Amino acid sequence: MNTPGQEAGPGAVRVVPTWTEPLAASASRMVGGPLGRHALVGRSRFWTPLRVMLLIAVAVLALGWLGKAPCVQQYSPDGGAPALDWRDSRQYVAMCYSDTVPLYGIEGLDNPTLLPYRDPWIEGAGTADEKKRYMEYPVLTGYFQYANARLADGWVWLTNQVSAPTVLSVIVYFHISAIWLALAWLAVVWAVRSLRRSRPWDAVLVALSPLVVVHAFTNFDTLAVAFAATSMLALARRRPVLAGVLLGIGGAAKFFPLLLLLPVVLVGLRRRDLGVTARTVLATTATWLAANLPVALAFTPGWWEFFRLNETRRADPDSLYFVVSHFTGWAGFDGPLADGESPVVLNAVSAALFLVCCVGVATLAWLAPRTPRLASLAFLVVASFLLVNKVWSPQYSLWLVPLAVLALPRWRLLLAWMAVDALVWVPRMYYYLTPENRGLPPDWFLGTVVLRDAVVVLLCVLVVRSVLRPGTDPVRAVGPQDPAVDDPDWPTAPHLRHAPDEPGPVAVARV
């Protein structure tokens, strides 16, 4: 056993969670207690930490799939053709709702002749609210859905050839999408594990996250999270062009990976590493343009639909603006709005608040006694965006999971936050069910939203403290462990835990 910084032989320094994390120590009692002082670490040929965590992640993803399974059942009404079983608001009562299921029909994915962004569909046909609509997602997510829909068509055709039982194409589509989304989350686990060679077991928080059980298959966000996490790994391995390409692809799937450009720039400025920063930003921009320009030029109205909807969207129930409006009777910044009218003031206020948050993060990065870790700044930027934005869709919380684990690996605290955030799903579903249908009044749901936001603010405060007081950072407590922002003159850990039955401060094991 060695204290951090000692070079007592070959191998890497590794933190022992059962010595440093009370939660891990308590859980270890079921298998004999914390790691012993003479135990050999890292000698297993097969059960490496990565493989164990991937196996845990597969089990958790399977639970998430089972949670959505009630919403992908079919029945035959009156002995007729099979139909999707969403009778009696099943999607809310069983809490299995997933955007992938209704979007399959709403966005014309069930029609192979309709190409996303090129071909519109009519919403509210024959009514006064009739309007032309296009695919509402960024281009890569839109074509991801289209490709999965065509794979589902192929599977249904194949089963028909062998006279297998008839399965609705929307059900096949959900399962195909779920496979890709699950693989994306496994990539997130791998990336977080690879970013923390001295603290590999922190990635178990990503694998075990309750948010994965609830939201891995709610929408398509695991794709963007995977590109964001792997881009951070590429930066850590000093491959800025690859990092930029991954960020650009992620930004073409969802907006949030592009938020990581600000932390990348701030860290680069602080380290005076402008070459790496410039290559990352240029590669991101070029990749995003390469993915978007062909669609934007060929199908401009369809490509613009994503931006139009975000501009005209009002404050969602998940936002603090809606919470304040509900509990105070406030009419909002824009007052009553007609259908399709943009909340101009709300958009401006939300953008201004986020700009203020970004200035605050930039100031923090500049005044910090040591170069902040990329994950710390990234968590603060993304959390700020969610807190002040007019929309916090439930699956957006997945964005924060790897960033929180990398920025503030305190097991009990992070699992408590993720559990609270995941439990918001329960009153959310019964809020949509409405009290008239034995649901819950809005107060229950909005109360849990406030609690969720309060916990995220607490995490932000602790991350800020770890930036201003690097000695409190559990990652830097064992030396500079973030190669992307490595500070070579950072002193060896001033605060070490005592291992069980050890006379001196020992927090790590030599692998």
Image: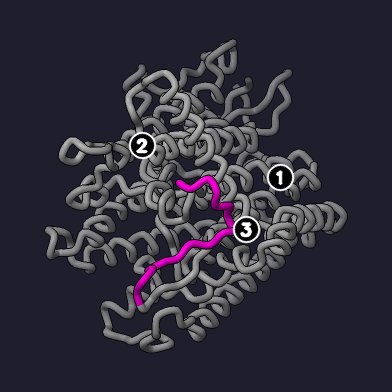
Front label number (1 vs 3): 3
Q: Is residue 438 left or right of residue 456?
A: left
Q: Secondary structure at mark 2?
A: loop
Q: Quadrant where the N terminus lies?
A: top right
Q: CA distance from mark 1 to mark 2?
A: 61 Å
Q: Residue at x 41, y 51 (%)?
A: 105
Residue 377: give its label. 3
> Which residues lie in the magenta part?
110-127
**Residue 363 image label:** none
Residue appearing at x 47%, y 53% in the figure? 108
Query: Who comes first in sequence, dot 1 or dot 3?
Result: 3
Sequence-first disc among 2 and 3: 2
Where is residue 33 drawn, in percent x and y? 37, 21
Front disc: 1 or 2: 2
Viewer-side residue, 222 vs 489: 222
Q: Nearer the viewer, residue 26 or 101?
A: 101
Residue under circle 2?
168
The residue identified by callout 1 is 491
Q: Quadrant of the C terminus?
A: top right
Does the stretch in magenta take in 123? Answer: yes
Q: Is the C-beta separation of discs 1 and 2 under 8 Å?
A: no
Which residue sits at x=62%, y=70%?
A: 358
